Amino acid sequence: MRGGKWTQWPSQEALSRVGIPRARMALDMALLAALSLWAVVSAYSSDVFHGWGAVLPPVAFAVCAAAGAHYRVTTLAHRLLPSMVLVAVFAAVGWGACLAEVPVAAMVLWIGACVMSMERLPLAAAFAIVVVMVPGFATVDESDWGAAATLASVLLGGYALRLDAEARGAGFRLLAQERAAREAEAVSAALAERARIAREIHDVLAHSLSAQMVHLEAARLQIERGPEGPFRDQILERVVAARGMAREGLAETRQALSALRGEMAPVEDYLRELTAADGARIEVTGARRLLPAEASQAVRRVAQESLTNVRKHAPGAEVRMVLVYLEGEVCLEVRDFGARGKTGELKVSGAGYGLLGMRERAELAGGTLDAGPEGEGFVVRLRVPA
C-alpha cells in the first residue's frame, strides 16, 4: 500500500462506475438534476440575473457540469492538482452566487464540492478543501449551529459514499483475484493433462514405431542377403517404403509430443526440413515470431498434407512453399506446377478427405483455407490468426 491513509487515493475500482446498479445511477442523476434546477431557479430571485444577466445561471451550471464530468476523469487517473483545480471551479462559482445574494445556489455548489472531495480525493486534500469552504458556510448560515450541522453532514455523507465505493471496489478486486486463480488452476490442469497424454503417446505409439523400424530394418537386411530376383526386389521395395513411413510417423509423433509439452521448434525450421525431404522450394517473409500452438500446428499439418497430396496426385511436380508473417496472422501457400506428363487427379477444392481435414483444422484455428487448381497445377492457401 503506497502512502499513508491520509494521502492514499481510493482504488481504481472504487473510482470507476463498474458494479454500480443502474437504478442507483439513475437516482443519483435525478438528484443532481433536481438540485441544479433548484439552484438555477433560485438564482432568478436576485436582481442581478435579469436582462442579459439571465443567461449567467445556466451558463455557470453548465461550466460546473463540464468540470464535474472532467473531475471524474482526473480523479480516476489519480491526478491531484487538476482535480483540485476543478473543485476550485465549484467553489468560485459558489462564491459568485453568494456575492449575488443567491444562498441556495452557493450552498448547493459548496456542498457538492465538499462531498465530491470526500468521496474521490485523498483524505488530506479533501479535508483541506472542506476547511476552505467553512467561511462560506458560515457566511450563508449565520447560525453557528446551522453551519456546524451542514459541515458535519457534508463530512459524514461524503465519507459514507467513500466507504461504500471502497467496499464495492474491494469486492471487485476479490472477484478478479478469484477469476485469475480459477484460470490459473484451469491452465495448470490442462498442462498436466497434456503432459499425461504426451507420456501415454510416447510410451505406446513412439515405442511401437521405434520397434517397427528395428524389425523392418532387420527384414531389409535379411532380404538383401537372399537370392536376387524380381520377387525379392518387390518385397525389398515394400519393406523400405514401410520403414520410411514408420520413420515419418515417428518424426510426426515427436512433433505432436513437443506440441503437447509446448516445446515446438520454430515453424519455419520444420517447413525447411519438410521441403528438403521432398526437394521443394521454400520462402519465408515477414517479421518472424513465435506462433500460438493452434496456428503453428495448422501450418505444419497443412504443409505436410499438401506435400502428401502432391506426391499422390502430381508425382514429380515442382513445388513451391511460401510462408508469410503478417500483422495479426500468418499465411501459407503451397503450389505445385503440375505433374510431368500427367494430369493431377485433385482438381476441385474440397475433393478428398485430406483437403476436408485441412479446412477443418484451419477453421478450428480461426482461419480459412482455399484450395483448387490454378494454371497447370494445384494451390493450397492457408490464413490463420497469429
Image (tube, rainbow, N blue to C red):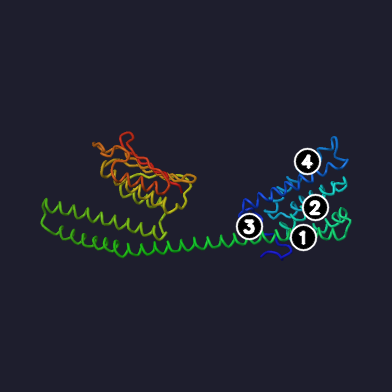
| Residues at marks 3 and 4 touching, judged by CB atoms closer than 8 Å | no
Q: Mark 1 or mark 2, which is nearer the start of the sequence?
A: 2
Disc on res. 110: 2
- Which residue, given by chain and number where applicable, does mark 4 sit on? 58
Q: Quadrant of residue 284?
A: top left
Of callouts 3 and 4, which one flags the residue occurring earlier in the amino acid sequence?
3
The residue shown at (45%, 63%) is 188
Amino acid at pointer 2: Trp
- In what quadrant of the picture does the N terminus appear? bottom right
Rendered location of residue 301, percent (x, y): 35, 50
Residue at the farthest top position: 375
Mark 1 and mark 3 lie on one chain; the one further toward the N terminus is 3
Q: Position of residue 376 (x, y in %)?
A: 30, 34
Q: CA distance from mark 3 to mark 2?
A: 26 Å
* Residue matched to label 1: 155
- Helix, strand or loop at mark 1: helix
For mark 3, what is the residue?
Answer: 13
**Real-space Cα separation, disc 3 to disc 4, in angstroms:** 33 Å
**Does the CB distance between marks 3 and 2 fall below 8 Å?**
no
**Is residue 263 or residue 147 the one in the foreground?**
147
